[in-house]
Image: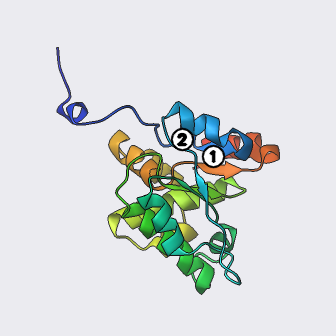
Amino acid sequence: MTVSLELLSRGPSRPDLLEDLVVAEPDLTAVLARWSAPTPVVVGSETGLGMPGVDAVAAAFAAGAPVLIDVAPGLAAPGSGPAGDRLVELLLAATHAEVGFGVGLVPRCGTADDVWALLSGAVAAMTGADVRAALAAPQPAALRSLSRAAREAVRDVVTCVVVPPSDIRRVTADVLVAD
């Protein structure tokens, strides 16, 4: 019998990159409960910026909670601007929170392109690459080709992505066929 030494140090099973990734907001708590993840804390946006503050998000991570946030302004300007800069800061904060699966960002977005941008930004934040460039030009095929451990690590940063219930089928299907 062959035993993979990589598996010996791994804790309980965590979702793979696309498993339970795209979730309708009403189903969020139930989906997270399947993975023994806590209910997310909603962190509101700062006035004028449209994005949450890094300190408020970091405080929620420190308390052991995933953070439900709106990221549309940051995705609209991933290469520049204050909202794009804040999205980069939030991905970096989630990367360095070191709390494990279930206590990451739970961003609200609306398209498969947004989902891939967030996952690409998470990988860039984890590897020290250019997060802005990754947000602006995601590479779904490269993300899918990561090792299982790497794909799980991405989910430590982006726990899952929330979309409106009316868009769940479309966004899920688009994510699955993206290259």
Q: Position of residue 21 (x, y in %)?
A: 57, 43
CA–CA distance in space, label 1 to label 2: 8 Å
Q: Residue at x 46, y 48 (%)?
A: 155
Q: Contact, CB < 8 Å: mark 1 with mark 2?
A: yes
The mark found on residue 114 in the picture is: none
- Quarter of the picture containing the N terminus is top left
Q: Residue at x 51, y 74 (%)?
A: 54
Q: Quadrant of residue 138?
A: bottom right
Q: Position of residue 109 (x, y in %)?
A: 68, 58
Q: Is residue 172 left or right of residue 20?
A: right
Q: In the image shown, does 42 or 171 lie closer to the viewer?
A: 42
Q: Is residue 88 visible?
A: no
Sequence-wise, the earlier of marks 1 and 2 is 2
Q: Badge 2, how many Cα within 10 Å: few under 14, some, many 20+? A: some
Residue bearing mark 1: 175
Q: In the image shown, does 80 or 90 lie closer to the viewer?
A: 90
Residue bearing mark 2: 18
Q: Is residue 27 visible?
A: yes
Q: Residue at x 56, y 75 (%)?
A: 53
Outermost residue on the top side: it is: 1
Q: Quadrant of residue 83?
A: bottom right
Amino acid under disc 2:
Leu
